[in-house]
Amino acid sequence: MRRLRGPIATTPARISAPVAAAQAVRGVPAPVKAARPPVRREAGPFAPVPTDRSRGPQPRRAADVALAAAALAATSPLMLVAAVAVKLDGDGPLLFRQRRLGRDQRPFTMLKLRTMTPGAPSGPHERYIADLAAGPAAAQSGQLYKLTADPRVTTAGRWLRRLSVDELPQLINVLRGEMSIVGPRPALPYELEFYEPRHFERFAVRPGLTGLWQVSGRNRLGFLEMLDMDVEYVRRRSAALDALIVLKTPAALVGRTA
């Protein structure tokens, strides 16, 4: 039998340890494993929006934590009174927990003081969002996200919503890192079907307690206009703009536009 000279061509996966050792002694270079080609993921309307995150200090996050902690301490007596009103108005949990979409469309549990009867269905609000997305005429029936004539809302809940006191527990979401003080409102999963492709830019940042459209008269804005203003905020985002929105929020609350 004729003896073969030279290394035997074989795949890296079939070379055993003894053969590899023998080849190393004879000076035969070890086969190089081919690099796997990168996997390309198609971008779609529901794909997370790429964000630029720095690994260094984050002054915005530090400011969020400081402001949220101070606001939580300052408003704790008000929240205590509101909590008593919620419990006296009927049975049910104190807090309302709802699944929302945050940065990169990651779901999280948003906290609010309960303003509706326990077990209230989401159907009326889903229909309202659909009507609002269809045209500005639906805005006459109530504020965005808050139906003023909603029969599901309790007596105490109407006052809490009018003063936006029901939103105060979201300061805990800010401390958790799920929300920011300023940013787009946390999106509801069932409203994404009405988004235009450009509107998914709003998921590039954390959602906020207040934002650009909240201080611009949200009861006069249509659904798509609100989304456009969220995108505008993301594109213009700066510390100066955040400070301006925070300063304008109390006046918006008094004017019942927030």
Image (tube, rainbow, N blue to C red):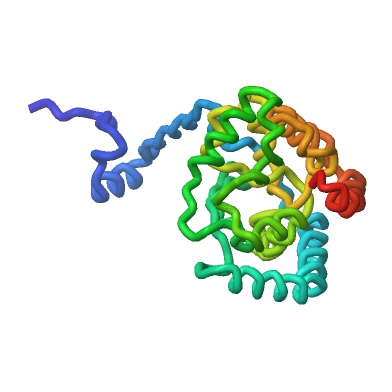
Screen quadrant of the N terminus: top left
Q: Is residue 54 visible?
A: yes
Q: Residue at x 78, y 58 (%)?
A: 57
Q: Residue at x 69, y 40 (%)?
A: 142
Which residue is at the front of the view, 186 or 106? 186
| Quarter location, residue 137 | top right
Q: Residue at x 55, y 51 (%)?
A: 152
**How far across and down, in percent of the image, does residue 64 sit?**
78, 60
**How far across and down, in percent of the image, does residue 252 sit?**
86, 48
Residue 21, placed above or below residue 7: below
Residue 210, placed above or below residue 126: below
Q: Residue furthest left?
A: 1
Number of marks: 0
Q: Residue at x 63, y 36 (%)?
A: 49
Residue 38, placed above or below residue 214: above
Which residue is at the front of the view, 111 or 84? 84
Q: Is residue 14 left or right of residue 233?
A: left
**How far across and down, in percent of the image, does residue 29 sit?**
39, 38
| Quarter location, residue 11 | top left
| Quarter location, residue 85 | bottom right
Q: Is residue 69 left or right of residue 85?
A: right
**How far across and down, in percent of the image, does residue 173 sit?**
65, 60
Q: Is residue 47 visible?
A: no
Which residue is at the front of the view, 103 or 56? 103
